[in-house]
Image: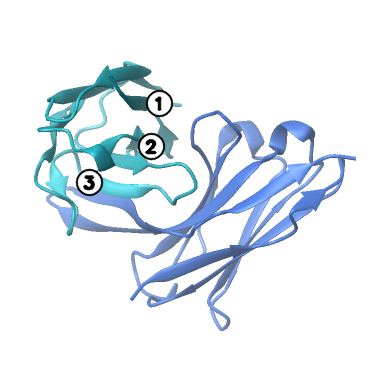
């Protein structure tokens, strides 16, 4: 059974750095084709994809936050860590991690995030 | 970046209704689109992947179609547990969610 769980501080101050950890089980990030993504949802707003790390350590970030985000993995601990610098009240949100997997059909590889954590709520306030 | 335009942003429907939600991509994305259901306080749930493939365990009243730039999610015979917010997600180039469609009880 695949599970993911997010952990981190519930409250951070403006300008601080947020560090979130996704601890997963039921799959390995050393398996070809596996990835973990981070997604957030500010109150009353849509889901927003933030970052992804592949099994081969390739990393991808949303353009709008690229300068503030760093994603990394520790395969021995089955963890993926997301850091976000210079936090602002607009970064108040529920943060989710999710497994991304996929399959190949013809020329393309079709990806999807199939299992998500329950999310962790982060409030940015002084 | 590829933009996803999802519509409507909200709709009211009754149990038993058929509901259709659409997503348009700003450029062709082949069939690289997934659909999610999100209930308050819960993790988003994958319904459809690669445009039309039903995720294991998802009721067959959910279906997806489309390719290129135009995609639809259809819910046949809406049930009470289907009242939620639905999102499309493109994975062709980077990752981009649509703005969501809130399905409310009429």
Q: In the visual, does A113 lie left or right of A97?
A: left
Q: Quadrant of the C terminus of chain A?
A: top right
- Circle 2 SS class: loop
Q: How many numbered discs? A: 3
Residue A119 at x, y percent in the picture: 55, 54
**Other residues around mark 2 within 10 Å, as few (<14) / some (14–19) / many (≥20):** few
Q: CA distance from mark 3 to mark 1?
A: 18 Å
Could you tell me if the residues under marks 1 and 2 are in contact, i.e. CB atoms within 8 Å?
A: yes
N-terminal of the pair, mark 3 or mark 1, is: 1
Q: Do we see residue A30 in this rendering?
A: yes
- In this picture, residue A74 sits left or right of residue B44: right
Q: Residue at x 38, y 77 (%)?
A: A26
Is disc 1 surrounded by few (<14), some (14 to 19) or many (20+) residues within 10 Å?
some
Q: Please check whether the numbered discs 3 and 1 fall on a single chain.
A: yes
The N terminus of chain A lies in which quarter of the figure? Answer: bottom left
The alpha-carbon separation of the residues under discs 3 and 2 comes to 15 Å
Q: Quadrant of residue B65?
A: top left
Reply above or below: B60 against B57. Answer: above
Q: Do marks 1 and 2 share a chain? A: yes
Q: Chain of mark 1?
A: B
Q: In this rendering, do the residues under marks 3 and 2 share a single chain? A: yes
- Where is residue B61 drawn, in percent x and y? 10, 40
Q: Can you identify the residue that label 3 sits on?
A: B49
Secondary structure beneath dot 1 equals loop
The chain shown in blue is which? Answer: A
Q: Which residue is mark 2?
A: B93
Q: Chain of mark 2?
A: B
| Residue drawn where x is 12% and y is 38% of the image | B63
Q: First in sequence, mark 1 or 2: give its number.
A: 1
Question: Closest to the observer: A115 or B60?
Answer: B60
The residue beneath circle 1 is B2
């Amino acid at each position: 059974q695949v599970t993911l769980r997010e952990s981190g501080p519930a409250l951070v101050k403006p300008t601080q750095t947020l560090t979130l950890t996704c601890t997963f089980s039921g799959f390995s990030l050393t398996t070809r084709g596996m990835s973990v993504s981070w997604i957030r949802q500010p109150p009353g707003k849509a889901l927003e994809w933030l970052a992804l790390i592949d099994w081969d350590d390739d990393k991808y970030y949303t353009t709008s936050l690229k300068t503030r985000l760093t994603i990394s993995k520790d395969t021995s601990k089955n963890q993926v860590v997301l850091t976000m610098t210079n936090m602002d009240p607009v970064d108040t949100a529920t943060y989710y991690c999710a497994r991304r997997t996929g399959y190949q059909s013809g020329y393309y590889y079709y990806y999807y995030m199939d299992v998500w954590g329950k999310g962790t709520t982060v409030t940015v306030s002084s | 970046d590829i933009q996803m335009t999802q519509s409507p942003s909200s709709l009211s429907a009754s149990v038993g209704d058929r509901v259709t939600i659409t997503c348009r991509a700003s450029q062709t994305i082949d069939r690289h689109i997934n659909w999610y259901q999100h209930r308050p306080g819960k993790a988003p749930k994958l319904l459809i992947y690669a445009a039309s493939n039903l995720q294991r365990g998802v009721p067959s009243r959910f279906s997806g179609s489309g390719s290129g730039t135009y995609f639809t999610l259809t819910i046949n015979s809406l049930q009470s547990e289907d009242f939620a917010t639905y999102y499309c997600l493109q994975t062709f180039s980077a990752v981009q969610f649509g703005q969501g469609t809130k399905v409310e009880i009429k």
